[in-house]
Amino acid sequence: MVTTSGRLSGVHRIGEPFDDLLPFTTDQLVRLDDALTDATRSTKVRFNVYVGDLGENTALGADAIFPHTPEAERSVLIAVSPNQRAIEVRGGRAVQHRVTDRVAQLGVTAALASFGEGDLVDGLVSALRVMSAAIASK
């Protein structure tokens, strides 16, 4: 479903049964969508989040996913593999002067405390807020 902000909120093909339980509640998805929208609007940089397996080498997994995200050239990807306890951040070429290693590290650091407590959405929201604040100030 594409939200009014243009975000892809979830994927389900029409006509196919949906038996899986969603990993997040509706309230959590709304919080995450709001944080993504706010970060994108305040920085003019597209923010994307991926939650799932990144493969044996998480850095290579994030590298493989990033080019297929919306507006990859002018975006940031925060990729999280919960089972591997890994966070990877990638930034597009058009925003590399604003999305620096320091900004990525700030986002990872902001997420870690909540991730350690088992709150994935809170960690992602924290990362988005900290990164967007750092980018907007540049």
Image (tube, rainbow, N blue to C red):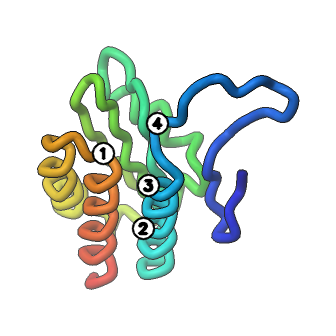
Instruction: Check disc 1 and report its element: helix, strand or loop.
Output: helix
Residue under the point 29% across and 56% down = 122
Decide which of tag 3 and tag 4 comes sooner along the chain: 4
Left or right, residue 65 beside residue 58: right
Among all residues in the image, which is located at the extreme right? 15
- Count of numbered labels shown in the rendering: 4
- Disc 1 residue type (three-letter): Leu
Residue type marked 4: Pro
Pointer 2 or 3: first along the chain? 3
In this rendering, position of residue 5 left or right of residue 130 = right
Asked where in the image residue 125 lies, by quadrant, the reply is bottom left
Q: Which residue is mark 2?
A: 35
Three-letter amino acid code of the residue under disc 2: Ala
Q: Residue beneath label 1, please?
A: 120
Q: CA distance from mark 3 to mark 4?
A: 10 Å
| Secondary structure of residue under mark 3 | helix
Give the residue at mark 4. 23
Q: Mark 4 or mark 2: name the one nearer the start of the chain.
A: 4
Q: Tell me: residue 58, above or below residue 113.
A: above
Q: Are there few (<14), some (14-19), or many (20+) residues within 10 Å of tag 3?
A: some
Measure the C-alpha gap from mark 4 to mark 2: 18 Å
**Any part of residue 111 in sight:** yes
At a point 72% along the width and 36% down the height, the residue shown is 12
In the displayed structure, would residue 34 be above or below residue 112? below
Foreground mark, 2 or 3, reads: 3
CA–CA distance between discs 2 and 3? Answer: 11 Å
Label 1 to label 4: alpha-carbon separation? 10 Å
Position of residue 9 in the picture relative to residue 44 (left or right):
right
Report the front residue among 98 and 18.
18
